[in-house]
Every structure is written in structure tokens, then in C-alpha cells.
Image (spheres, rainbow, N blue to C red):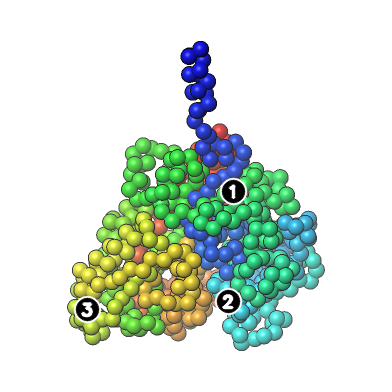
Amino acid sequence: MLILAGFLSAAGCGRRETLVETGTRDQVLHFGNKDEPSDLDPQINSASSTFNILDALFEGLVLFSSDGRTILPGMADRWEISPDGLTYTFHIREGARWSNGEPLTSRDFMDSFMRLLDPQVACEEVGWAYPIRGARDFAEGRSTDPSSIGISAPDPRTFVMVLGHPAPYMLMLLTNSTFFPVYMPSLDANGGRHQRGGPWTRPGVLVSNGPFILAEWKPNAYVSVKRNPDFWDAGRVLLREIRFYPTDDENAEERAFRAGELHVTARLPKTKVPVYQAALSPQLHMVPILRTNYLSFNVQRPPFTDARVRRAFSLAIDRARLVRAALGGLGTPAFSFVRPGTGGYTPARGFPFDPAAARKLLKAAGYPGGAGLPPVELTLNGNAGTAIAIAEVLQQMWAENLGVPVTVRALEFKAYLSTEREKQFQVLSEGWTYSMADARDLLEEGVTGDPSNDTGASFPDYDGAFAAADRTADRARRWAAFNTMEGVIAREGFYAPLYYSNQGFLVDPSVRGWTDDPLGNVQDWRDIHLGP
């Protein structure tokens, strides 16, 4: 009797299944996603972490395969490009539907592209549309005539895009969330298509066209998406649900993985990398991704209105030491703005460590040894882990090499994005994950007036070089223009590259079909499923 009672008691207190175990059985993927989304409006998104969610909810004309290189058909099942490289004709696939069952047509893309160019919406990545004829003039208010823009929908299944100049990278640009279609009746019923985000992006309201639909959004807990039965390729979607978890602290995220609460992490603490490497863990993934992490100096706020001060702060940074101290194997020191090898392009090393030259520049600007320099504040995204470690090393270097004390302001993600957008900072620590393997993607951030130019910098020779690179398909000419832009950044110091990311993260063995992507994203959710 006692033995039987003990056995029954032990059976009743058996170990509970973890989220990973139940998720694997039920095809529910638990995904660490770093940031709490500020909104799920695809046309105003500039966060790579939010793209993972948007990529599950929406599909554009074309998409990247999971290798981050190959262009696949999306809502367009085929397309033609004219011999002169200017006219792209996309054929919307038959049976394409919104998640509410309504047909998706070329007019939906026409309206969505017009919203992207709407000056009232002020999409951050509107510059990606500028190769389209007339797009920039309309977006910047020099034209108010929609017919001047090179887009048309001659019939419900044909969408035509005419460029102002050949742009061999255009299909890669179209994979971005900026070009995803949005369901205009929902926007018009919930505040209008001219606003940024709004109630139409919430569960129960959001109408999408991707492999998943928005099921739940519990702020600072998770975003849940569930399989969309109206998706054109629903038969290939094996996951039943994905839960995206915001994870501000990479240490807590790693512990959650070990506890069976996550199938995939967004990142890994630097101290844990050698532990997993020593164990030869198949869970560890280390991927050199196309991402530059850098400082943005607000050229409209003292003391960084002076290029000598900006350059002094950059020259005072020992990037190799920064990576050793704060990142370990998760970073590579950045001596150019663009990561070498991006699309075959390798820039010159224009950002050395030279504390003596830095002190001379600061003195020439009227601040010998930092005397008289206005207070300086460094703004961060997040207040834990790598962000703080980097800030502490930078503070120490600027104090040692310039005699300048710098305070730190750490913000949660939504406040950080608002501060960035409104340029309410002096020095901003940020990073850019490239949307394609082409230097243009990052270098556009230096163009005058570009919404992603957080510095407010404006230099005619930079703009001229960008325009020259955009108007030629010749590799040598493009690279020469890229070199000019890198040179202007080094000369004027409005950006200071710090390091290139080597993404370290963990993937549970139950995740099948995973492909490491140099663009840092899961590109095609149809490839992913779960198994024992």
C-alpha cells in the first residue's frame, strides 16, 4: 500500500512539459525577437526585429528565399523586365487573397505604393522607392500629381513599375516591408490611410496577406500569429503558430532557452559564446551578418555642429579594444562604414584609432583637453547587456583620450525610436541590418533629407556620388562612387562606425528547415517546421 501510494504520488508530480516540448508537438514556434514592436504598419517599419513579424503577416511582389540571396515569386508569380532595365511588369498570381477572403489585386499594390510616397505618412524607408520615375519629387512635395509616378495597374492582375534609371538591385529592394501591400478599406475605416499606424494594426482588425494572421498582441509579453488558411501557398505552411517574445536582456533570454521556453533566441551574451563553443553545441549558430553598428552625431546640436569635434570623438575610439571588451566573438571592428565584401565591394579603412590627432582636433575646435565642451550625452536602445557594455567602454575611452565625461541615456525601444525620429539626441548608438547585399542600402543613410539620415548631415559631394551610383549598373563606377561617400563620412565624421555584427544565437534541434541568413532574418517561414 505504501509503495503504491508512493508510486502514484510520484506519477502525479511528474515533470511538466516545457513550452518547447509542447510547441514542437503542436507546431507552435517560440521565437525570441529582441524588441517590442512599436507598431505593425509595414510601411513605417525600420526595425529588423519587427520585420520578422511583418514577414510572417504580409507578402510583397517578390521575396528572398531563406538563404537571403535568391529572389522568389511572392504575390507576383512571374515578371518581365524590359531590355533597357526600366519597365518591370508583375503578374499578380491568380487566387491571391487577403486574410478576410477578399481578392488581392494590382490596385492594392498601386494604393500601397502611393501611401509609401505620401508625405503625410513620412515613411522612413521611402528612399527605397526613389528609383521609380517621379517617386522622389512626389514624396518630397515637388509634385502633387499621382500620374507623374511610374506605377500603374492596367488590369486587376498586372502591376507595372517604370524606373527613372536602371536599378539592377530593384527586385532586392522590393523584398522589404516598405513595399508590402496593406488593406486600404481597413485603414480608411480606422483613422485613414494618411496616418502612421493606428488601430488597423491590432488583433481582430489587421487584414494581411501573408502565411500567418495576427492572433494576439500582449505588449511586452508576446505577439502571436497563426496560420492563414487564405494564403495562396497555405499547404506549404507547416507551423500552426509563431509566438514572438520581446527580450530586452540577452542573459535572461539564454536562460529561457535552457529552460525550454524558446526554440530560437535573437542573440547570445558574449560570455556564453565560448561555453557553447567548448561544448561543440549544435544549438549555437554564429553568422557574420550584413550589419554595421555605429554612432550617429547630430550635426544640428552643439558641440557636434563642428566636424572637428565629431572626428575627434571618432578618432578617440579604439575599435579593436571595444570589441574585445564588450563583444568578444560577436563583433568585428569596423574601420569603414560599409562592411567589407558587401556585394563584392571593399572600402578603404577610413576610421583609425589616433588619440593624439583626436586631441589636436578638439583643441583646434576650442576645447583643449575637453575644457569648455558642452555636456555630452550618449543615447542607447536598452539598458542591459551589450548596449550598456559598449556605452561603458566608450565612456572610458572618451575620458582617457579626450578628457571628456559623457553621460548615458538608456531608453526602451519605443522611446528610442521616437527620439531617433525627432532627432532629440546628441550622440546616438544605433545599427543597420542591410536589407540586401549591396552597399547602397547603408550608404543611403547619408543622403540629404533621407528619413533614415538621423544625423541631419547634408553634403553635395555625398549626394552627387549617391546619385551617380544609383544611375549606373557598371560595377567599377558604382564602387568609385561608394568610395567617395565613404570618404565624405570620414572627412565630416557625422557617422562613426564601431563594429560589424557576428550574430550569435541559439536554435533548438527540433527546429527543422532553418537556414542561417547573412541578412539576419528568417526570410521564408514556409521552410520552417518542428519535429522531435
Q: Amino acid at mark 2?
A: Ala
Question: Furthest-right residue in view?
Answer: 155
- Left or right: where 219 falls relative to 57: left
Could you say whether the residue bearing mark 3 is in a helix, strand or loop? helix
Q: Which residue is mark 1?
A: 242
Q: Which residue is mark 3?
A: 370
Q: Is residue 254 visible?
A: yes
User: Who comes first in sequence, dot 1 or dot 2?
Assistant: 2
Please, is residue 227 above or below residue 40 in the view? Answer: above
Q: Is residue 495 visible?
A: no
- Left or right: where 381 falls relative to 125: left
Q: Residue at x 53, y 26 (%)?
A: 12
| Residue 443 placement (x, y as % from top left) | 46, 71
Q: Which mark is residue 122?
A: 2
Question: Furthest-top residue in view?
Answer: 1
Could you say whether the residue bearing mark 2 is in a helix, strand or loop? loop
Q: Tag 2: Cα neighbours inside 10 Å, few (<14), some, or many (≥20)? A: some
User: Who comes first in sequence, dot 1 or dot 3?
Assistant: 1
Q: Tag 3: Cα neighbours inside 10 Å, few (<14), some, or many (≥20)? A: some
Q: Tag 1: Cα neighbours inside 10 Å, few (<14), some, or many (≥20)? A: many
How much space separates mark 1 and mark 3, taking CA atoms? 51 Å
Assess whether mark 2 and mark 3 are in contact (beta carbons under 8 angstroms): no
User: Who comes first in sequence, dot 3 or dot 2?
Assistant: 2
